[in-house]
Image: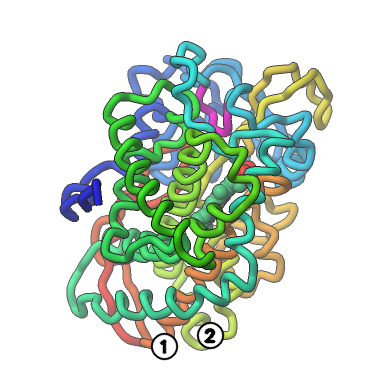
C-alpha cells in the first residue's frame, strides 16, 4: 500500500480534527473584545471550564433568540430553545446549510480561499444536491445493517474491555474512546483492520471539516488528503473487482448516484463520514463515564437494571451533547419568534442549550437514565440533515454499556479530567479512570 500506518504515539499525540479546528474557532484571550457581550457564547473558555450552563439558562428564560452584535466570529444570533431549533431545522430552504452561504459552524467562511480547493461535503449542501449525496451512504445505516455489524462491534468491544488494566489509573479517552471509535469506523467501511489507525490519523489531520469547507487547504493537509485518496483509490479498485459487499465502500461503488459525483466530492464525503463519526462517538463514550461518576445513583441504577441500557444511551447522548452547535444562514429576510432576521444573518443552533431546555426536560441538569423523553434530545440535529450515522453511534454505545455490565465493570474517575477547548465539539481530551467491580 502507498501509505504506511503511522506509529501509534505519532497520531495519538497529534491534535484531533476538532482541536485543529479549535485553533481557528477558539477565541484567544487577546482576540476577545475588551468587554465581551454578555451572551457571546462563542468563547471557548466557558466550555473548557464547564461553566456554560447558567449563561444559556438565563438566555432561555428571556426568549429563544438573542442577537450578539460583536464577537471574534462577527455578529450572530443565538438560538437557545428546543422549539426554535426544531423550527429552523424544519425550514432548510429558508435557513441554509450550504458552504456557499457560510457553512455549518459559527466560523466565517474565508471568501478569499482559493477557488476549487474547498472540500465539498453533503452536510454543508442544500437540496437537491444534499438529497442525492446522502442517498449514496444512507443504506449503510439501516436497522438491517446495524444487525449485521452488531456481532463484530461486540467482539471488538469485548476484546478491548478485557485488555484494560485493573487496579491502575489510565486515560479512558485514549485507551477506550478513541480505540473503539476507530474500530467501529473500520467495520463500517470494511476497512483493512490492520490499517484502521489510518482512519484516526486521516480524521485528525485531514478531516478538519470546517477548515476544509471555509478556508484554503494548507499544503500539509493537501498532502495527507492525497495519501488518503491514493489509499482509497486502491481499496476502491480492489472492491470494484469483488462481488458487491455490505460495507460502505462497496455500497458507494455500486450506487448509481456515485457516477455523478466528482472525485473532490467523493473525498469530501469520505472525510465527512470519518470525521462525523469520530469525535462525536468518542466524546459520548467519555461523557458516559464522566456522567456516571458524577451521578453515582444513576450508575447504580444501570448496574441493577441492564434493561435500562437503551434509554441510558439516549440520556447520555442528551446529557453530553457532543456537538455544541450547528449553524444556519438566512437565505432571505424573515420574522422569527418576533425577531427580524435579515438575509445573510448567521443563526447558531445551540444543541447544548436545547438539551437543557426545562420546557421539555424536567431537571434537565441531572442525568436520569429513566427519563421518558430522553430520545427527544437534539444531539443528532433534526430534519433533512439529522445525523445519518445516529443508529451506528447508538449501537456502539449500547454495546459498550452491555459489555461493561456483563463484566461487572465499574469505572471511576481517578485523576485528571481535561475538556476540549472549543465551542463546537463538546468533549474530553483526557479522562483518567480506574476500574473496579460492582
Ligand atoms: C450529521 C451529531 C455520529 C455521520 C450530524 C449532525 C449532528 C451530528 C449534530 C448535523 C445535524 C443537523 O444539521 O441537523 C452526531 C453525534 C454522533 C454522531 C452526536 C455520535 C454520538 C455519527 C456517525 C457517523 C456520522 C457514527 C458516521 C459514521 C454524519 C453525517 C452527517 C452527520 C454523514 C451529515 C448528514 C446530512 O447532512 O444529511 N451528526 N453524529 N455521525 N453525521 Fe453525525
Q: Secondary structure at mark 1?
A: helix
Residue 344, x across and y down, in percent: 68, 18
Q: Label 1: how many residues lie within 10 Å, few (<14), some (14-19) or many (20+)? A: few
Looking at the image, how many numbered discs can be counted on the residues?
2
Q: Where's residue 328, x and y in %?
A: 65, 31
Q: Are marks 2 and 1 in contact (CB under 8 Å)?
A: no
Residue 113 spot, x, y in % from top left: 45, 16
Residue 35 on the magenta span:
no
Instruction: Find disc 1 in the rendering and name its residue.
Output: 406
Q: How far apart are labels 2 and 1 at the CA level?
A: 9 Å
Q: Identify the mark nearer the N-term, 2 or 1.
A: 2
Foreground of the two, 260 or 180:
260
- Residue appearing at x 70%, y 40% in the figure: 61
Tell whether 24 sits left or right of 91: left
Residue 306: mark? 2
Q: Of the residues tagged 2 and 1, which is closer to the observer?
A: 1
Magenta residues, as a range? 103-108
Camera sees residue 228? yes
Tell me the number on the disc at residue 198: none
Where the C terminus falls, by quadrant?
bottom left
Q: Residue at x 59, y 59 (%)?
A: 390
Magenta stretch: dominant secondary structure? loop
- Residue 95, given in percent of the width and then of the height, sits at 73, 30
Name the residue furthest front: 241
Q: Nearer the viewer, residue 45 or 381?
A: 381
Quick one: label 2, few (<14), some, or many (20+) residues within 10 Å?
Answer: some
Q: Residue at x 59, y 34 (%)?
A: 124
Secondary structure beneath label 2: helix
Can residue 356 be seen in the rendering of this structure? Answer: no
Query: Which residue is pictured at 67% across the width and 26% down the height?
Result: 329
Q: Is residue 104 magenta?
A: yes
- Toward which corner of the image does residue 211 lie, by quadrant? top left
Amino acid at each position: 500500500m502507498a501509505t504506511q500506518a503511522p506509529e501509534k504515539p505519532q497520531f495519538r499525540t497529534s491534535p484531533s480534527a476538532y482541536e485543529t479546528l479549535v485553533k481557528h474557532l477558539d477565541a484567544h484571550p487577546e482576540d476577545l473584545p475588551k468587554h465581551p457581550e454578555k451572551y457571546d457564547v462563542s468563547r471557548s473558555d466557558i466550555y473548557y471550564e464547564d461553566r456554560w450552563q447558567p449563561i444559556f439558562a438565563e438566555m432561555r428564560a428571556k426568549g429563544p433568540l438573542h442577537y450578539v452584535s460583536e464577537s471574534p466570529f462577527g455578529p450572530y444570533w443565538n438560538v437557545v430553545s428546543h422549539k426554535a431549533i426544531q423550527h429552523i431545522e424544519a425550514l432548510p430552504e429558508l435557513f441554509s446549510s450550504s458552504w456557499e452561504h457560510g457553512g455549518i459552524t459559527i466560523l466565517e467562511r474565508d471568501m478569499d480561499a482559493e477557488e476549487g480547493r474547498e472540500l465539498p461535503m453533503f452536510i454543508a449542501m442544500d437540496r437537491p444536491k444534499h438529497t442525492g449525496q446522502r442517498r449514496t451512504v444512507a443504506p449503510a445505516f439501516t436497522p438491517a445493517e446495524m444487525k449485521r455489524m452488531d456481532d463484530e462491534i461486540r467482539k471488538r468491544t469485548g476484546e478491548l474491555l478485557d485488555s484494560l488494566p485493573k487496579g491502575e489509573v489510565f486515560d479512558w479517552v485514549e485507551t477506550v474512546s478513541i480505540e473503539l471509535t476507530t474500530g467501529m469506523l473500520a467495520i463500517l467501511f470494511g476497512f483493512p483492520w490492520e490499517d484502521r489507525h489510518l482512519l484516526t490519523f486521516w480524521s485528525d489531520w485531514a478531516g478538519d471539516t470546517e477548515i476544509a469547507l471555509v478556508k484554503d487547504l494548507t499544503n500539509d493537509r493537501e498532502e495527507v488528503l492525497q495519501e488518503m485518496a491514493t489509499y482509497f483509490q486502491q481499496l476502491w479498485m480492489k472492491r470494484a473487482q469483488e462481488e458487491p459487499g455490505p460495507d460502505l465502500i462497496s455500497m458507494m461503488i455500486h450506487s448509481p448516484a456515485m457516477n455523478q459525483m466528482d472525485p473532490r466530492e467523493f473525498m469530501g464525503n469520505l472525510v465527512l463520514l470519518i470525521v462525523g463519526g469520530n469525535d462525536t462517538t468518542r466524546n459520548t463514550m467519555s461523557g458516559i463515564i464522566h456522567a456516571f461518576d458524577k451521578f453515582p445513583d444513576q450508575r447504580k441504577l444501570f448496574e441493577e437494571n441492564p434493561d435500562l441500557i437503551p434509554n441510558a444511551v439516549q440520556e447520555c447522548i442528551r446529557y453530553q451533547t457532543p456537538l455544541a452547535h450547528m449553524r444556519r444562514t438566512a437565505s432571505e429576510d424573515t420574522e422569527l419568534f418576533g425577531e427580524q432576521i435579515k438575509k445573510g444573518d448567521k443563526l447558531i443552533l445551540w444543541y447544548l442549550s436545547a438539551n437543557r431546555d426545562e420546557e421539555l426536560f424536567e431537571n434537565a441538569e441531572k442525568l436520569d437514565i429513566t427519563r421518558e423523553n430522553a430520545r427527544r434530545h437534539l444531539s443528532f440535529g433534526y430534519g433533512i440533515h439529522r445525523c445519518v450515522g445516529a443508529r451506528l453511534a447508538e449501537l456502539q454505545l449500547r454495546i459498550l454499556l452491555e459489555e461493561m455490565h456483563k463484566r461487572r465493570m465499574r469505572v471511576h474517575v481517578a485523576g485528571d479530567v481535561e475538556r476540549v477547548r472549543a465551542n463546537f465539539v463538546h468533549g474530553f481530551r483526557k479522562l483518567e479512570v480506574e476500574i473496579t467491580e460492582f
